[in-house]
Amino acid sequence: MSDLTTAPPVEQAPPGEPQDRGVRATLTGMADRVRGGDLGVWPVVAGLVVIWTVMQVLNSVFLSSANLVNLAMECVPVGVIALGVVFMLLVGQIDLSVGSVSGLSAAITAVLFVDHGMPAVVAIVAAAAAGCLIGWFYAQVFNRLGVPSFVITLAGLLGFLGLQLLTLGPKGSINLPFDSWLVTFAQLDFVPPWLAYALSAAGAAALYWTGHAKAAARRRAGLPATTEQTLVLRSAVLLVGLAVAVWYLSRDRGVGWMFVLFLGLVLAMHYVLSRTKYGKSVYAVGGNVEAARRAGINVKAIYTSAFVVCTTLAAVGGILAAARLAAANQSSGGGDVNLNAIAAAVIGGTSLFGGRGNAFAALLGIVVIQSISSGLTLLNLDSSYRFMVTGAVLLLAVALDSVARRSRRTHGRA
Amino acid sequence: MSPTPSTAAPAPAAAKDGALLSLRGVSKSFGAVAALTGVDLDVAAGEVVALVGDNGAGKSTLVKVLSGVHPPDAGTITFESREVSVPSPAAAQQLGIATVFQDLALCENLNVIENLFLGRELRALRLDEVAMEVRSRELLRQLSAKIPSVEAPVAALSGGQRQTVAIARSLLGDPKVIILDEPTAALGVAQTAEVLNLIERLRERGLGVVMISHSMADVKAVADRVAVLRLGRNNGVFDAETTSAEELVAAITGATDNVVSRRSRRARAAAGEPGTGPGAGPGDAEEPAAPVAMTKEDGDE
């Protein structure tokens, strides 16, 4: 989120006339971009506020600490899968099989860990490796035979569901022992409040420090830079926000380690996508494959990496889901997991057409979806309503994206 | 200003000493189709050579030979007085021959800096954004490019600005020769002027420029020499200053009496002017609507 709020305004001083960007310039720049159809995270945040308000009015338990703690934990498995989907969408492809792959990975973990008595670590690594291998296989079919990713992964959706059922065997369900660290991690491990506050402070300090170093380097090079005032304000807002969240969640059980892991993955992915040569190549392939190829980017390798990252994260999500449920069964990764993961990526602002979006989309999107799910569950409405509401929100998100795209086009920012 | 009414090519002004890039007898066939037959071309440093010809004359093939996309079947390429081979696009860039293709190959979702440095970012694992921005601004300033912001996505730029970005990108590799494929096609009047200014700045920087164009007006505006290709062969090298657009069209189509000259004669007759010989009035050089219609004997594809 940080870079979205600090990205410089499009209109700026002409080259050679460095002019620092203060708080006001940053805010006007943001407003300009929104008017131009570059909505960024604002629609999602606004949607989230609306959903939370409505849910709270309908049932006052919704915004309680206890429910929000649960909500945060529930977000993680599908959120991790959505992170992989974001990657896939960025290169302009799609993976429809993330649900099945996560189910297969849950089954592998449970069979190796429980039935074969292997250490949890071995089971986890094996499941993640299986996910990795599936991605590699997809990529070979995609790169060598030119089959559309849509079709490959649709075949995978069915095929790996079958493999999941085969792996689970006739029992169809395997319970994970409650005293294993895997289950404890997903259900009971919470960050002690003091550490959570310390992590929040460290996060805010890191944001300030990186911003400060960047601004200093830019000033040395004679480029316009973000002012100290903006940097401090930005970090202060983050610090207060995180501290309030930690305080509120700590009234109940607090912030789960699993959620911290998710945040860590999102931040790592954000760094890779925005600050490395590889990340730029991913956006380039999603934006214009031919241009990427002419620029000397190994397009096939980028596709391969996207498939592998997506299926591996799907496998990791499947392991976390099994740990959270303390079981792997025939419906692991089934039902709405697949579509929720893809919907989360899209609702969070990742374009279905490639080259547009970022890692935070997975986080925001999954919070929206889980909020709806949690709120409707609290209202004792069964999944029939949940499906309909989630479907409507997805349609709304894509419609908003399409309208924004049209606006971008008329403002020349398509 | 001594127009020669004949279409015979003037004595080749090529083979200058100090030519940066020289092609001699370059041939290229695709199956049974001979796209290029014994083509010669010279480009000196600080010189703009326009490459003109009708559709199917072999211009694009020649560009692809130079940029390493298609290696030639026969002939020699001499670069900086060394005979070289250009087996791949990477080899061409290594030598210092940069090509800007007509479709520009820019990523619209990335900004100007990201496009300039695409595929050659500084510091792969922790991008040196400051250095890349400084270099981008410097380069665009040298070209006096009018880009609203280096942080604007390319989608926000006009056609001329995109052409500028594409040319600037090719300059990052410090080339000695730059090949522009139809740089002014599909541009408006002001944008075309912008790109022509840019081409003049490339010449001032001492680069050899090969410009493919269908627009006689643009060719006359910036080129030093005009090399005409017809049916995959050289059809004369002309001095851009002293050759009229009509003579060029005559060389391109291979006939003094061609569609374009007939049109201008008709126009003059309609205006009540006495019939003047072709090439007598350089002012009437109406831009032939590209692509120029072929005359009967033009049997190529």
Image: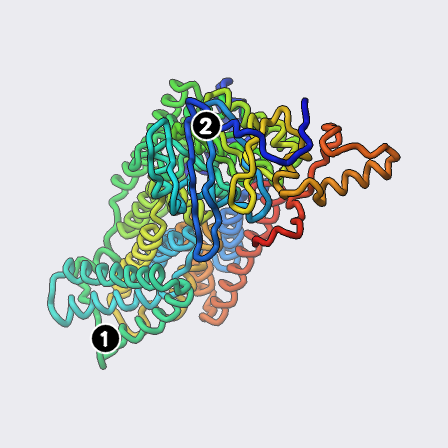
Q: What residue type is labelled 2?
A: Ala
- What SS does tag 1 mark? helix
Residue B4's spot in the image, x, y percent?
67, 29
Left or right of A385, for residue A111 = left
From the top left corner, tell me how far across and down residue B242 is, in percent. 64, 25
For mark 2, what is the residue?
B15
Residue at 79% x, 39% y is B265
Is A350 or A170 nearer to us in this picture? Answer: A350
For residue B293, above or below residue A232:
below
Image quarter of the C terminus of chain A: top right
Looking at the image, is mark 1 or mark 2 nearer the viewer?
A: 2
Residue at x-position 76% and y-position 42%: B263
**Going by the image, does B5 lie left or right of A69?**
right
Residue at 36%, 45% in the rendered image? A297
**At 54% from the left edge and 60% from the top edge, which residue is drawn?**
A395
Residue A283 seen by the camera? no
A358 displayed left or right of B104: left
Please, what is the three-letter code of the amino acid marked with disc 1?
Leu
Q: Distance between the residues labelled 1 and 2?
A: 78 Å
Residue placed under numbered mark 1 in the picture:
A168
Residue A79 place in picture, x, y as percent: 36, 55
Confirm whether circles 1 and 2 share one chain. no
User: Which image quadrant for residue A163?
Assistant: bottom left
